[in-house]
Amino acid sequence: MRIGEVAGKSGVPASTLRYYEEIGLIPAPVRVSGQRHYDAGIFSILHTIQTAQQAGFTLREIREMMQHDDWRSQWHQMAREKLVDVKQAIAHYRDMQSILEMSLQCTCSGPDDCMVLVQRR
Amino acid sequence: MRIGEVAGKSGVPASTLRYYEEIGLIPAPVRVSGQRHYDAGIFSILHTIQTAQQAGFTLREIREMMQHDDWRSQWHQMAREKLVDVKQAIAHYRDMQSILEMSLQCTCSGPDDCMVLVQRR
DNA sequence: CTACAACTTCAAGCATACTTGAAGTCAAGG
DNA sequence: CCTTGACTTCAAGTATGCTTGAAGTTGTAG
């Protein structure tokens, strides 16, 4: 399969496939007179990447995971670390939420009598 | 007060103050032979910016809010919109969390028998 | 053979919020 | 006057995950 077909079936744009290859995230496929020819295995690789991205991993981290040969223990270790970040992020967004909700209750006329702003000094 | 003193008291680096001025987020202070001289009002402005940032607004949005003369109604409107984003973000991070937690339960040996990956096809 | 689509590489651009560096100016103390 | 620290402007760099554009090559249909 050429790059356009992989792009069409996977939903990953051709430019992205080239980019992934450039950064060493996916293996360079066979070239037939310069053009990339992929085999079916590419789809499971792309799927893994997509899921890992949804789980919050960066491409750099995903690349590290895939380079490692003990796939699962590497994933587990990074997942534990990432879970900490994700929980912090959730806490952070909750803080945002409460600031926003509080500010919607506020009847201030300016920054100096705004309870949200004044309270947080 | 010169920029260094404002930076010291507010915790906002001088480079950031110049940057804020450049993008029109804070008013350009009086120049005394080229140097910026701020009055005490700058602190409440910076505080408002910090709080708005913590609430998830971008500098661009904060600038818009401050340009508007009906301060509160503008803030309220943008806060309502932002709240939607924040809730989505929380939902998104929760999804991440569940993918990560599920993956930690997984005893797969490779991408093809990994329940997390296979499940999400 | 000729189009035209699909492919190639390489470089640069996008968004955000700043920081860093270079090169020069100014203020205050001795 | 001289030094030193604080300031000035302007340009470019940082991180991330791509996209876009230019200019050229290849594959396929008619």
Image (cartoon, coloured by chain):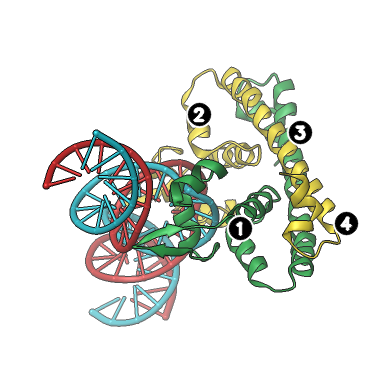
Chain colours: A yellow, B green, C cyan, D red
Q: Could you tell me which secondary element the residue under label 2 belongs to? A: helix
Q: Which residue is mark 4?
A: A105
Q: Residue A98 placed where, x, y %?
A: 81, 46
State which tag comes first along the sequence, 2 or 4.
2
Q: Are marks 2 and 4 on the same chain?
A: yes
Name the amino acid type tagged 2: Met
User: Separation of disc 3 and disc 4 at Cα?
Assistant: 33 Å
Q: Position of residue B81 (x, y in %)?
A: 76, 62
Chain under disc 2: A
| Residue type marked 4 | Gln
Name which quarter of the figure residue A51 lies in.
Answer: top right
Residue carrying label 3: B98
At a point 48% along the width and 22% down the height, the residue shown is A68
For residue A82, say whether it is visible: yes
Q: Nearer the viewer, mark 3 or mark 4?
A: 4
Residue topped by disc 2: A66
- At 78% across and 66% down in the image, what residue appears? B72
Label 2 and label 3: CA atoms lie apart by 21 Å
